[in-house]
Amino acid sequence: MEDKDPNIRRWEDLDIDILVKIFQLLDIFELTSGISRVCSAWRMACCDPLLWKTLDLSMLRSNFIKIPLEPYVYVDERSDRTLTRILKISLSLSRQSIMTLIFHFNLYASDEQLTYTAERCPRLKRLVLPAWNRIKKTGMCKAIRCWEELESLTMPSIANPPYILEEISTNCKNFSELKIMGPCDIFFASSLAAFLPNLRVLSLRCSILYTDVLILILDSLQNLEVLNISHCILMEVLPAPQHKKIVKEIDVSIRQKASRLREFLTCMDDNCVMCQRTRTDEGLVRWYKYEEGLWKKDEVRSLTL
């Protein structure tokens, strides 16, 4: 038998730091495909915290159909099993290193999947979870209680916001940044004022926004530094029989209220493609119609993905 060339290094002898740099080029499907089982060195590299600061699941989507009753979507079992498998492997390898967690807007996690995740990433600082259809109030509250270090949340517009905002107020003392993907009505704005008065960054882009809601936000959130209403359809409530109208220009009095902010981001340009899309979709943008990744954008740098 020929002797092996002593100058040829084996894969398992490769420096761990080099392996980590290589693995940083892999996506979540590749990282969870079984490379951690190749050898002990690869396992060690796969558990390096540098790989797991962000768990980005935005490549993963549920296979679902819309249904007329709550939760309004049905996700097939194979799709659920795929998400569960990826979560279990990722959360095992990450060893509680995850600080940012990103879900696709068509990835419908269940209560069980969210709870399992929350319990295994207690250091989470940023959550991007645009779809809550299958997550009940109890499941969301249980998850928030695990995330005492949470600072930033991207969420959908929901009918009953006080429960989640109160939970954040109670458990997440450093919370400062919120993005709502959908309309923010007077009830939502009032809830923000009641439970998150120290909010510093708020993005309401690409939705319907009424002027009275905007005024309430500017008057009530005294610690607000950045407000993004870019590409919003700005509406004003009028007496009958007109009821409401689209506002083409932001009122001087509103701009004066917003002058205290570090950034007041607006765009109401008829020639703006994103403004046109918001109007076409009547203030509830159907992100699936447009180029992949568009939903990740935000004029606020800290909120873009």
Image (cartoon, rainbow, N blue to C red):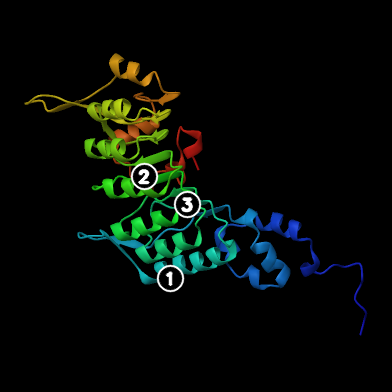
Residue 207 numbered mark, or none: none
- Residue 294 is situated, as x and y percent measured from the top left of the image, at 44, 42
Residue 63 image-quadrant placement: bottom left
Which class describes the residues within 10 Å of circle 2: few (<14), some (14-19), or many (20+)? Answer: some
* Callout 2: SS: helix
* Circle count: 3
Q: Which residue is mark 1?
A: 81
Among all residues in the image, which is located at the extreme bottom? 1
The Cα–Cα distance between marks 3 and 2, rounded to whole angstroms, is: 22 Å
Q: Residue at x 48, y 49 (%)?
A: 149
The Cα–Cα distance between marks 1 and 2, rounded to whole angstroms, is: 33 Å
Q: Residue at x 65, y 73 (%)?
A: 37
Q: Which residue is mark 2?
A: 169
Q: Residue at x 75, y 61 (%)?
A: 16
**Nearer the viewer's eye, disc 3 or disc 2?**
2
- Residue 198 is situated, as x and y percent measured from the top left of the image, at 39, 35
